[in-house]
């Protein structure tokens, strides 16, 4: 009985110590990410989908602004898709000729996708850059700034023919496997 009482007392004390950490809304830091699909190689005329995911710490604080910028001589804006959340961006501003998309007064968390089309006139080995700048803390004075970039290389031939060993290796392995099966069957017959 004494062991059970001590065990319960220890459990309660541990819970009281851990409870303030769980209840505090500022346990994690705000973050924002920028991803591109595809990331490695694109050809002129292809599209790139940029995904932006962000999370803050309080519904009383907003992101102001979340701004994406690109070189308009290399990419054209094609589409913007917000997530299901109703108040993701209270105001969206697109300045296509300047290569700027702004999400103003974004809610505490959200997910956006921006689709860009690569112009057919982009030279080979061009680095396409998508720049993201965001501030978290509006309307408070103590704002956090985030500055991210994603690079993608334009190539005229992203799917080159494989070199000799990689092209011949799979058929050789299949033929070898079949030959092994036939050899095992033949040795069982004798």
Image: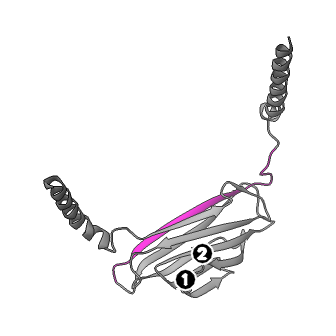
The answer to whether marks 1 and 2 mark residues whose Cβ atoms lie closer than 8 Å is yes
Q: Helix, strand, or loop for circle 2?
A: strand
Q: What's the image's color scheme?
A: one colour
Measure the C-alpha gap from mark 1 to mark 2.
8 Å
In the rendered view, tell whether residue 75 sits above or below residue 150.
below
Q: Identify which residue is drawn at 24% across, 64% down.
A: 15
Q: Residue furthest top?
A: 190
Q: Identify which residue is drawn at 61% across, 67% down.
A: 130
Q: Is residue 127 magenta?
A: no
Badge 2 density bin: few <14, some 14–19, many ≥20, Cα 10 Å: some
Q: Position of residue 98 (x, y in %)?
A: 65, 79
Image quarter where the N terminus lies is bottom left
Q: Identify which residue is drawn at 46% across, 70% down.
A: 146
Q: Helix, strand, or loop for circle 1?
A: loop
Task: Give the residue number, with chain letter if any, for mark 2.
Answer: 112
Q: Position of residue 12 (x, y in %)?
A: 21, 64
Numbered circles on residues, count = 2
Task: Give the residue number, with chain letter if any, for mark 1.
Answer: 88
The answer to which of 27 and 113 lies nearer the viewer is 27
Image quarter where the C terminus lies is top right
The answer to which of 146 and 188 lies nearer the viewer is 188
Q: Identify which residue is drawn at 26% across, 69% down.
A: 19
Badge 1 density bin: few <14, some 14–19, many ≥20, Cα 10 Å: many
Q: Quadrant of residue 52?
A: bottom right
Q: Position of residue 36 (x, y in %)?
A: 63, 63
Per the rendered image, the range of residues in magenta is 141-160
Q: Quadrant of residue 27?
A: bottom left
Q: Residue furthest left?
A: 2
Q: Is residue 99 left or right of residue 164?
A: left
């Amino acid at each position: 009985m004494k062991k059970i009482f001590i065990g319960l007392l220890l459990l309660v004390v541990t819970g009281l110590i851990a409870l303030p950490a769980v209840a505090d809304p500022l346990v994690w830091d705000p973050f924002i990410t920028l991803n591109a699909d595809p990331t490695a190689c694109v050809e002129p005329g292809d599209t790139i989908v940029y995904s932006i995911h962000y999370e803050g710490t309080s519904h009383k604080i907003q992101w102001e602004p979340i701004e994406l910028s690109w070189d308009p001589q290399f990419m054209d804006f094609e589409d913007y898709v917000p997530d299901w959340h109703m108040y993701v961006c209270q105001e969206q501003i697109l300045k296509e000729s300047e290569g700027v998309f702004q999400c103003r007064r974004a809610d505490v968390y959200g997910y956006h996708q921006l689709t860009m089309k690569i112009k057919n006139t982009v030279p080979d080995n061009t680095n396409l850059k998508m720049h993201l700048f965001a501030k978290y803390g509006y309307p408070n004075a103590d704002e956090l700034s985030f500055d991210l970039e994603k690079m993608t290389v334009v190539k005229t031939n992203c799917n080159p023919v494989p070199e000799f060993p990689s092209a011949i290796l799979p058929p050789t392995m299949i033929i070898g496997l079949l030959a092994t099966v036939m050899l095992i069957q033949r040795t069982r017959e004798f």
